[in-house]
Amino acid sequence: MNIIVTGGAGFIGSNFIFHMLKTYPDYRIICLDKLTYAGNLSTLKTVMDNPNFRFVKLDICDREGVYKLFEEEHPDIVVNFAAESHVDRSIENPSVFLETNIMGTSVLMDACRKYGIRRYHQVSTDEVYGDLPLDRPDLFFTEETPIHTSSPYSSSKAGADLLVLAYHRTYGLPVTISRCSNNYGPYHFPEKLIPLMVINALHDKPLPVYGEGLNVRDWLYVEDHCRAIDLIIHKGTVGEVYNVGGHNEMKNIDIVKLICKELGKPETLITHVTDRKGHDMRYAIDPTKIHNELGWLPETKFADGIKKTIRWYLDNEDWWQPIISGEYQNYYEQMYGNR
Ligand code: NAD
Ligand code: DAU
């Protein structure tokens, strides 16, 4: 089996590559990644010499390059993780989100149509459903919840999802889509809540909580997401959407307090800063469909996963130190300097 994994030098894509190479020693995995600010080749160093692995630096919007790769590799499956993924950046500069997340997806699907494919899998997000009110804990996102996006990021992901379903209906492309809640774990880029707070706390820097910090996210350990995608590409029904989440809702402020506690840092580091524009209040996934149809259940409890994740950041400073000392400094200053 030949699998092209796009965006495999990023957070979830790299964890998925590790999972697949370990679980299926006879599969060939081809990682296609543009290596944007969020892609890090050092993340893949442990698999670079694996004879079943190939890395190709390529933009998913580069039609000619993508077609050439399909001609060379004849993939059976494409799993598309490649995306601009950070909501705050999409608020500053939407256009690159539309380019990569929508146009890039269409290039990949055109290649799948042209050369033939057993499965095209789109890695989407629960953010396409918009948000839920804090005072209705009985409400969850199901696969039937209407698309109702808030940010340029989530709108671009929703646009891609609609295009994927249209390629299935119009051209019969064998597609599946997964919509997962917030992931956490190793190799999470330091601009995102959990790694940002861990790294700032380690440096005794202010912990910038947007608004009051009452927004709720539904956290899932990254390996559980990877197992869900593995199940969907092997056993999922073509044309279907699967929500992925582990019923682990937490307020941002409680996550940040937990990180302070784990690292032995004072909560006085917490600083409330200007809220994110259009900030979604609550995400909460109903994972009944993937559980009933594919037998998926999360394996890592948040209490264990967050400890493992913090330990990973403590043990892997050589991974994140070069990131935070480079171009990321400018981003941080621009995003948080006057907040
Ligand atoms: P990430 O930002 O860590 O990684 C994205 C990767 O895509 C990087 O390696 C980057 O270099 C690559 N990339 C970006 N533009 C590209 C292009 N034009 N061509 C080729 N490669 C390109 O993102 P992530 O958090 O790992 O998210 C991966 C996917 O999962 C995204 O599609 C995201 O929408 C989705 N998702 C993320 C989460 C989460 O909590 N992080 C939850 C649900 C869904
Ligand atoms: O739900 C899935 C989505 O989760 C994915 O589709 C996105 O790609 C991924 O980035 C993530 O989006 P969020 O916006 O939920 O994640 P982020 O880590 O940016 O923020 C989590 C929450 O923490 C959110 O309510 C904003 C808040 N926050 C974030 C940062 C970076 C802060 O309060 N302070 C911060 O400095």
Image: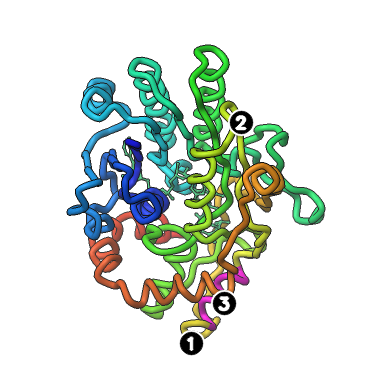
For residue 240, which numbered disc appears in the image?
2
Range of magenta residues: 253-261
Is residue 255 inside the magenta stretch? Answer: yes
Of labels 3 and 2, earlier in sequence is 2
Of labels 3 and 1, earlier in sequence is 3
Query: The N terminus lies in which quarter of the figure?
Result: top left
Instruction: Give percent across and percent down for residue 223.
Output: 48, 58
Q: Residues within 10 Å of mark 3 (few under 14, many from 20)?
A: some
Of labels 2 and 1, earlier in sequence is 2
Residue flagged by tag 1: what amino acid is it?
Answer: Gly
- Secondary element type, mark 2: loop
In this view, 116 is above or below 258: above
Q: Is residue 96 left or right of residue 178?
A: left
Q: How many marks?
A: 3
Residue at the extreme top: 170
**Real-space CA distance between mark 3 and mark 2, rounded to the nearest whole angstrom:** 37 Å
- Secondary element type, mark 1: loop
Instruction: Give percent across and percent down for residue 90.
Output: 45, 41
Residue flagged by tag 2: what amino acid is it?
Answer: Glu
Q: Quadrant of residue 209?
A: bottom right
Residue flagged by tag 3: what amino acid is it?
Answer: Leu
Instruction: Give percent across and percent down for residue 107.
Output: 36, 23
**Real-space CA distance between mark 2 and mark 1, rounded to the nearest whole angstrom:** 45 Å
Q: Is residue 26 left or right of residue 209?
A: left
Q: Residues within 10 Å of mark 2 (few under 14, many from 20)?
A: some
Q: Which residue is mark 1?
A: 264
Main SS of the magenta segment? helix
